[in-house]
Image: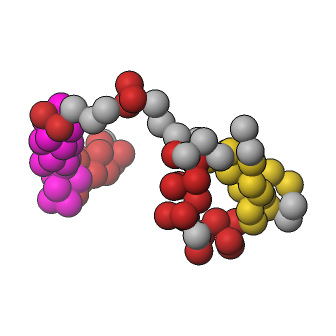
């Protein structure tokens, strides 16, 4: 297996090209100050995305955000807590 080492700035500028090289079997090492810190490798075929599961998980995240307390809820909670300090 051949390999190539690129610095972080070069990797940033050539990311698409480096991804294509990794998919072709070239080991791409990303270096900071000449020291390899990351390896770009292809993802195997088992990582296929299940679109239905992805959409469902995004819906669940939206539901969790909707359940977050509002500013008014937090203010009311703090008012009750502060009142208990004076008791």
Task: From the viewer's side, name the closer residue of 48 and 72.
Answer: 48
Main secondary structure of the magenta stretch? helix
In the rendered image of this protein, does residue 36 appear above or below residue 47?
Answer: below
Which residue occupies 60% across, 42% down? 25
Residue 45 falls inside the magenta stretch: no
Quick check: can you spot residue 18? Answer: yes
Task: From the viewer's side, name the closer residue of 63 and 3.
Answer: 3
Q: Decide if residue 43 is on the left or right side of residue 87.
A: right
Which residue occupies 27% across, 51% down? 78
Residue 84, how many percent across, how many down?
29, 42
Q: Decide if residue 61 is on the left or right side of residue 15.
A: left
Residue 44, how many percent across, how many down?
46, 30
In the rendered image of this protein, does residue 5 appear above or below residue 56?
Answer: below
The magenta stretch is 53-74
Q: Quadrant of the N terminus?
A: top right
Q: Decide if residue 10 is on the left or right side of residue 58.
A: right
Task: From the viewer's side, name the closer residue of 72 and 41.
Answer: 41
């Amino acid at each position: 297996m051949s390999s190539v080492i690129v610095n972080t700035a070069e990797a940033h500028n050539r990311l698409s090209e480096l991804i294509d090289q990794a998919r072709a079997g070239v080991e791409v090492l990303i270096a900071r100050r000449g020291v390899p810190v990351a390896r770009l490798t292809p993802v195997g075929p088992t990582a296929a995305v299940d679109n239905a599961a992805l959409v469902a998980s995004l819906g669940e995240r939206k539901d969790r955000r909707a359940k977050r307390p509002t500013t008014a809820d937090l203010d009311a909670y703090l008012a009750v807590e502060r009142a208990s300090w004076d008791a």
